């Protein structure tokens, strides 16, 4: 009888622990090696081809962004250029860097980290971006284009082009009102910079000529914890630092 009780206790502990491991909600991130930058004008991302069983908690990819004003002109989006573009850009990147491709540091509150840095969620024109970047995008190539001859856009497998839109909400009123990622005078206007709501997705570079603007983007996989129904996230990956084309 004594041994039966001991066996029962051990059985409950072992099965309880194993169930906990199996049920732990995990979402696979976009591997850093799947992201290919073409200077500061274009990025291609090979989205992983996960089966439904491999990423069963997944709902969609999310891209967080922030715009930085600069007086430095560069075609290189390498990490070594971040301090020259903007000390704030570099500081923010250093905050996120420990989480990149580091599953041991992934937090269900990764979105809180981006919110604390005043990063916002990217939108697109004429399409729900959550649906666009759902599991239907698995195994496909996502391109984000900031070439000088067009409004910045994204496309999957060279299909329909959707113009990128800045976030619009209670804490951010983007100007110009069209919300496009273009280097317009409204972004560098001193009155707009001083306002706490207008263009709160933009970081100034005090004392600079304010001639250029760059956007920093990170991509994370998002999903739903089936036990708690809370939103969960993968580790982030740096999409890149892209230069906004001049307004035209």
Image: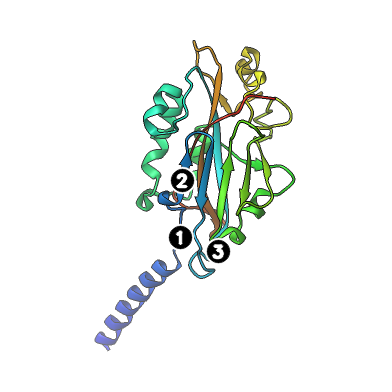
Taking the view exactly as shown, the residue that stands out farthest to the left is 3
Dot in front, 2 or 1: 2
Q: Identify the image quadrant of the N terminus.
A: bottom left
Q: In which quarter of the image is residue 176?
A: top right
Q: Looking at the image, is 138 positioned above or below residue 219?
A: below
**What residue is drawn where x is 47% and y is 41%?**
37
On screen, residue 101 versus residue 6, left or right, reads: right
In which image quadrant can residue 121 be found? top right
Which disc number belongs to residue 26? 1
Sequence-wise, the earlier of marks 3 and 2 is 2
Task: Estimate the x, y position of residue 75 in percent, counting from the top left.
Answer: 47, 29
Q: Can residue 34 be seen in this view?
A: yes
| N-term mark: 3 or 1 | 1
User: Which of 88 and 155 lies nearest the eye of the viewer?
Assistant: 155
Nearest the eye: 6 or 73: 73
Q: Which of 201 and 9 is in front in this view?
A: 201
Identify residue for label 2.
36
Q: Position of residue 181 (x, y in %)?
A: 63, 31
Residue 77 drawn at (x, y percent): 45, 33
Residue 86 in sight here: no
Q: Looking at the image, which residue sits at the far front? A: 149
Q: What element carries label 2?
A: strand
- The residue carrying mark 3 is 226
Q: Distance between the residues labelled 2 and 1?
A: 25 Å
Q: Return the disc, 2 or 1, that comes first in the chain's sequence.
A: 1
């Amino acid at each position: 009888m004594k041994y039966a009780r001991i066996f029962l206790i051990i059985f409950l502990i072992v099965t309880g622990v194993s169930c906990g491991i199996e049920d732990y909600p995990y979402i696979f991130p976009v591997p850093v090696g799947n992201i290919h930058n073409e200077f500061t004008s274009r990025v291609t991302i090979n989205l992983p081809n996960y089966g439904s069983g491999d990423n069963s908690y997944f709902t969609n990819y999310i891209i967080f962004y922030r715009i930085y004003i600069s007086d430095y002109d560069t075609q290189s989006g390498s990490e070594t250029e971040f301090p020259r573009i903007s000390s704030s850009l570099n500081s923010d990147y250093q905050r996120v860097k420990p989480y990149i491709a580091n599953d041991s540091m992934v937090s269900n509150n990764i979105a809180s980290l981006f919110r604390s840095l005043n990063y916002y969620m990217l939108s697109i024109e004429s399409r729900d971006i959550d649906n666009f970047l759902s599991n239907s995008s698995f195994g496909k190539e996502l391109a984000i284009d900031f070439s000088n001859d067009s409004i910045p856009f994204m496309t999957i497998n060279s299909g329909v082009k959707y113009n990128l839109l800045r976030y619009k909400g209670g804490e951010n009123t983007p100007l110009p009102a069209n919300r496009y990622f273009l280097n317009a005078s409204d972004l560098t206007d001193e009155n707009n910079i001083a306002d706490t709501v207008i263009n709160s997705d933009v970081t100034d570079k005090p004392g600079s000529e304010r001639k250029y603007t760059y956007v920093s983007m990170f991509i994370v996989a998002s999903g739903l914890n089936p036990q708690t129904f809370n939103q969960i996230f993968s580790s982030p990956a740096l999409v890149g630092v892209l230069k906004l084309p001049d307004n035209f």
